[in-house]
Amino acid sequence: MGIMMNRRLFLLGWLFQIRTARLQVEVMEVFLSPDGPSALLIHHANEETRDAFSRWLRSNNGSRISFRLPNGSQFDSRIFRMNLCFGRGLVLTRSTIATKPKDVLQIV
């Protein structure tokens, strides 16, 4: 019985990971440099995903991730949890990203 429960928990965790990998986030602020790195301050895209995004952000602090822009293009970055700003993430990129506040990005 214990093995069966572990399999269920594993599968539920795997399914949850797939669901959160498709989270959407909203851009709050954009910090651009004409020739180099950019930064985006992000948070959950809607109230329904707030808790899932918060959990995802805590477990992915400092991770390399990819985002899909509204125009379909994708970029790689690194994300950091803002400790003093609950539910906010700071996304650092190596190049300028064509996005603006209120854009909704998808975590891929």
Image (spheres, rainbow, N blue to C red):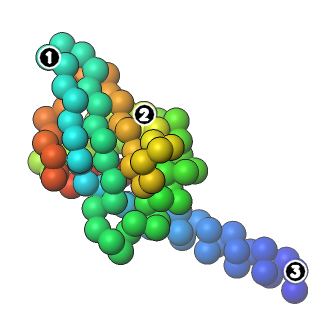
Query: Mark 1 falls on what kind of element?
Result: loop
Give the number of the disc on residue 2. 3
Q: Residue furthest front?
A: 84
- Is tag 3's residue or tag 1's residue first in the polypeptide sequence? 3
Q: What residue is rendered at 78% in x and 81% in y?
A: 5
Give the number of the disc on residue 94. none
Determine the image quadrant of residue 2: bottom right
* Inter-mark Cα distance, 3 to 2: 38 Å
Which residue is label 2 attached to? 78
Labels 3, 2: front one:
2
Labels 3, 1: front one:
1
Circle 2 packing at 10 Å, graded few (<14), some (14-19), many (20+), is some
Q: What residue is rendered at 35% in x and 74% in y?
A: 48
Circle 3 packing at 10 Å, graded few (<14), some (14-19), many (20+), is few
Q: Residue furthest bottom?
A: 1
Task: Check disc 3 and give the amino acid type.
Answer: Gly
Where is residue 44 shown, x and y percent of the image?
A: 34, 59
Task: Check disc 1 and give the amino acid type.
Answer: Pro
Dot 3 and dot 1 residues touching (CB under 8 Å): no
Circle 1 packing at 10 Å, graded few (<14), some (14-19), many (20+), is few
Query: Mark 2 falls on what kind of element?
Result: strand
Task: Check disc 2 and give the amino acid type.
Answer: Arg
* Inter-mark Cα distance, 3 to 1: 57 Å
Q: In the rendered view, does 4 fall on the left or right side of 30?
A: right
Q: What residue is rendered at 15% in x and 40% in y?
A: 99
Dot 1 and dot 2 residues touching (CB under 8 Å): no
- Is tag 1's residue or tag 2's residue first in the polypeptide sequence? 1
Which residue is label 1 attached to? 34
